[in-house]
Image: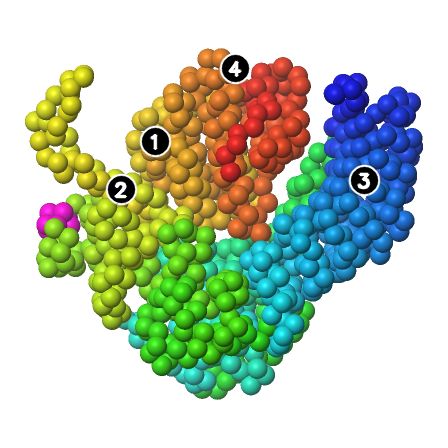
């Protein structure tokens, strides 16, 4: 038994224990810390004998009841009970634990908390995430609490008194159907919540708002339906007037429900920005042109959208809307196509359900299921968050009766609180006052029609009608309006903290100047006059077109010209504002910053030919260029999603794959989200500055080490493979450094995955023997990548491992040793 600082610690993690070992209990008062995580314990009878325990880890076991004996461990300071099956906690447990400061109860089945929990008076850290709690009132009174996590429960309200403590520093409540305060308030942090309750005491109101997203392929009739619903009668939309990017409109119905209508462009090139605006707590209307529908196009016209919705918002409510029925030959054609779509969608959802059930059974049947309890928890959440598809509605967009019928159906559906529990929210009256005042100032012309203003400008405008409004209160209100899509304010981007977009559609219209399906043709249309303004020639324009079409690289100069033209079309004449948005030769504009912030592109440089007449460099002598312009950066942006084919330079620099390469495969269930790989690549490029990018693979280097990241998403199981080059590793130190690079990539991958609530991942290391299909599964890979907690990661202590087919390899080539990489 190890002894640290005179105290004994017992590590029994991952020993497949079903009961407490007798030799542990015989130590009685000698043991200070015990780690029993990752076992198969269903009870811990006798644990009270270890009366001097200060730290106890019972995480990842099979406990169904909270052990009553723990109340006898009165010296306990830290207690881990996470990832069990605990449904309730008896009274009279926590009042006895006077010294307890840390309690982790996440990922259990708790439906309620003991009424005396607030008597655990020294508690500082409490994690109750991933349970079934509907009320956290028993936590009121924990005056020393600094960190509280209640994510992914069933909470609709949070008690005001919980946030009156001056000690609380960190709080998270994501993925709850919160109405008071709304989740959008909670995402703003503690200050936003405290400000919310403070303003709520003065006056409040109840609002019913629902974000309605129109999705579907190009020319499916989304814009026609969206505008017709807003007007209440058919509105025809010409082909030239179709949506480019995203359009936003608002409408109130007779029941007082406010619809915020988001009309998404259907061209595939625009999908790269859709992930930014497709958010939880929304009603999705999927438009399908029945006149052009064919069963062989189901995947593209319907399946693609259903998959993307369930990956991003797995508990979404989706309405299938068949359009252009007037262009079908007869009612039978409409009926047959509707039935085909309905049957295929049902089959998709059924296959996902069966796949999740099978994955769960596979994990349960493992010899030691406690090792994969985290994965089982994720699968359980996916099974609970079921995508709901409403009945198929078909309409003739030109028929007033059909538009009226659609309106009536939508109005009825959104009032169902089981389907939309988040629609009704309680807000301070001043939130509504600020939103109305902003709109009034826009309507009156006090604020420019483009709606781009500074933080201070808004406060100055609003101070004329509300003297009590200060900068701190306004900040909380603007953050809420941003998260609900009413405005856009990227306060987390340092250079843009003072810029507020009161009209989101205007900013999105600037995105479409760059991210569009016909970008190459737009580059060709750049006039000589616009080129001259940037000191550019027509030959430069030709180079921009070639670089974009062949390498997906777009010159910053071209971006400035395109965005400048879009601003002029929108009537913006403020040169200072234009410069802020488009940038200069020395400084990137805010639009480029936003595109990089959204992982749409990454900064790079234009290609430039070598100068054979350049002066020779001599040591100890200052080098002077023949042309001072060599010092000017040829800034550009690389858009991975626009790559047309793989870059052969990647494989040229990598060489051939080798069975002895370190290989990690991250499998995605049900599939890899659209554009996930390219966004991951962009994030990795921000760490490793030397790289080669292809459409489905990317090579990174650090020193003399190479790392290949490759997407396999064409057929069968979809995964992202990470390879460390075998020839770069001659010692164990080299191998460890390769694992450190892999860890950084996997940390970025895990963080990015959080944006898709409907994704489950498995990590494998394949056997290295030629032709062998066996693999080694990582049970605790998430522990390995968790920053600063790598001591939890238990790599197999054996020097060698053997696969199910009998092939043996050194463990360090299959799994990493404990190593902390402090990269966030």
Ranked by sequence position, the earlier of labels 3 and 4 is 3
Ranked by sequence position, the earlier of labels 2 and 3 is 3
Q: Which mark is residue 99?
A: 3
Residue at 89% across, 31% down: 51
Residue at 42% across, 17% down: 727
Tell me the distance, in whole angstroms, between the alpha carbons under discs 1 and 2. 17 Å
Residue 540 falls inside the magenta stretch: yes
Ranked by sequence position, the earlier of labels 1 and 4 is 1
Residue at 54% across, 68% down: 283
Secondary-structure class at tag 3: loop
- Asked if the residue under mark 4 is in contact with the one under mark 3, i.e. CB atoms within 8 Å, the reply is no
User: Residue 503: image x %, image y %?
Assistant: 39, 69
**Which mark is in front, 1 or 2?**
1
Secondary-structure class at tag 1: strand
Q: Which quarter of the picture shows residue 775?
A: top right
Ranked by sequence position, the earlier of labels 1 and 2 is 2
Residue at 69% across, 43% down: 376
Circle 3: is it few (<14), some (14-19), or many (20+) Cα within 10 Å? some
- Asked if the residue under mark 3 is in contact with the one under mark 2, i.e. CB atoms within 8 Å, the reply is no
Residue 186 is left or right of residue 510, and the answer is right
């Amino acid at each position: 038994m190890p002894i640290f600082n005179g105290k004994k610690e017992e590590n029994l993690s991952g020993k497949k224990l079903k009961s407490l070992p007798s030799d542990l209990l015989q130590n009685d008062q000698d043991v200070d810390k015990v780690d029993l995580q990752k076992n198969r314990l269903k009870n811990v009878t006798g644990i009270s004998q270890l009366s001097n325990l200060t730290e106890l880890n019972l995480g990842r076991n099979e406990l169904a009841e909270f052990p009553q004996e723990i109340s006898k461990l009165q010296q306990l300071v830290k207690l881990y009970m996470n990832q069990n099956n605990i449904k309730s906690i008896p009274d009279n447990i926590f009042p006895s634990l006077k010294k307890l400061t840390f309690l982790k109860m996440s990922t259990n089945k708790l439906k309620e908390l003991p009424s005396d929990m607030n008597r655990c008076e020294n508690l500082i850290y409490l994690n109750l995430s991933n349970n079934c709690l509907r009320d956290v009132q028993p936590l009121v009174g924990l005056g020393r609490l600094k960190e509280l996590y209640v994510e992914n429960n069933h909470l609709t309200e949070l008690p005001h008194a919980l946030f009156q403590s001056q000690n609380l520093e960190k709080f998270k409540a994501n993925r709850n159907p919160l109405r008071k305060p709304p989740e959008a308030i909670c995402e703003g942090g503690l200050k936003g919540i405290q400000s919310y309750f403070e303003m709520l005491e003065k006056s409040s109101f109840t609002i019913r708002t629902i974000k309605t997203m129109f999705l579907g392929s190009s020319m499916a009739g989304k814009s026609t339906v969206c505008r017709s619903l807003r007007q209440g009668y058919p509105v025809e939309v010409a082909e030239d007037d179709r949506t480019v990017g995203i359009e936003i409109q608002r409408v109130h119905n007779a029941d007082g429900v406010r619809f915020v209508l988001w009309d998404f462009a259907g061209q595939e090139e625009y999908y790269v920005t859709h992930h930014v605006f497709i958010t939880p707590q929304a009603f999705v209307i999927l438009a399908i042109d029945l006149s052009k529908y064919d069963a062989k196009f189901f995947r593209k016209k319907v399946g693609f959208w259903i998959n993307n919705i369930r990956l991003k918002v797995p508990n979404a409510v989706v309405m299938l809307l068949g359009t252009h029925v007037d262009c079908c030959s007869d009612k039978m054609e409409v009926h047959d196509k509707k039935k085909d779509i309905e049957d295929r969608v049902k089959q998709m959802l059924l296959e996902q359900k069966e796949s999740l059930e099978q994955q769960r059974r596979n994990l349960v049947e493992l010899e030691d299921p406690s090792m994969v309890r985290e994965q089982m928890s994720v699968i359980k959440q996916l099974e609970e968050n079921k995508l709901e598809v409403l009945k198929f509605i078909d309409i003739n967009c030109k028929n007033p009766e059909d538009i009226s019928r659609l309106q009536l159906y939508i109005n009825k559906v959104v009032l169902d609180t089981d389907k939309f529990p988040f629609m009704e929210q309680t807000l301070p009256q001043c939130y509504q006052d600020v939103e109305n005042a902003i709109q009034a100032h826009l309507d009156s012309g006090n604020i420019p029609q483009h709606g781009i203003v500074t933080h201070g400008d808004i406060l100055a405008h609003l101070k004329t009608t509300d003297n009590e409004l200060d900068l701190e209160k306004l900040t909380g209100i603007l953050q809420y309006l941003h998260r609900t899509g009413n405005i856009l304010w990227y306060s987390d981007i340092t250079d843009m903290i003072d810029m507020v977009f009161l009209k989101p559609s205007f900013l999105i219209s600037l995105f479409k100047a760059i991210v569009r399906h016909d970008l190459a043709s737009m580059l060709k249309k750049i006039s000589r006059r616009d080129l001259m303004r940037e000191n550019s020639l027509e030959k430069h324009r030709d180079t921009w077109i070639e670089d974009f079409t062949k390498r997906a690289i777009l010159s910053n100069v071209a971006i400035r010209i395109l965005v400048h033209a879009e601003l002029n079309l929108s009537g913006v004449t403020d040169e200072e504002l234009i410069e802020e948005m488009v940038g200069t030769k020395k400084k990137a504009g805010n639009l480029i910053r936003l595109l990089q912030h959204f992982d749409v592109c990454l900064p790079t440089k234009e290609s430039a030919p070598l100068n054979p007449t350049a002066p020779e460099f001599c040591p100890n002598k200052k080098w002077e260029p023949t042309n001072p312009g060599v010092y000017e950066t040829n800034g550009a942006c690389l858009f991975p999603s626009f790559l047309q084919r793989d870059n052969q330079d990647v494989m040229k620099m990598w060489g051939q794959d080798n069975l002895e390469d370190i290989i990690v495969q991250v499998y995605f269930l049900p599939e890899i989200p659209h554009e996930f790989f390219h966004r991951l690549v962009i994030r990795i490029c921000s760490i490793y500055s030397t790289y080669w990018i292809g459409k489905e693979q990317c090579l990174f280097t650090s020193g003399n080490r190479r790392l290949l990241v490759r997407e396999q998403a064409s057929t069968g199981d979809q995964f992202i493979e990470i390879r460390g080059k075998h020839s770069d590793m001659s010692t164990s130190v080299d191998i460890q450094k390769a694992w450190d690079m892999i860890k950084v990539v996997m940390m970025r991958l895990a963080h990015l995955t959080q944006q898709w609530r409907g994704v489950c991942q498995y990590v494998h290391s394949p056997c290295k023997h030629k032709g062998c299909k066996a693999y080694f599964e990582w049970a605790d890979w998430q522990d390995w990548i968790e920053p600063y907690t790598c001591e939890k990661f238990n790599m197999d202590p054996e020097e060698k491992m053997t696969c199910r087919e009998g092939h043996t390899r050194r463990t360090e080539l299959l799994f990493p040793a404990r190593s902390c990489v402090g990269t966030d």
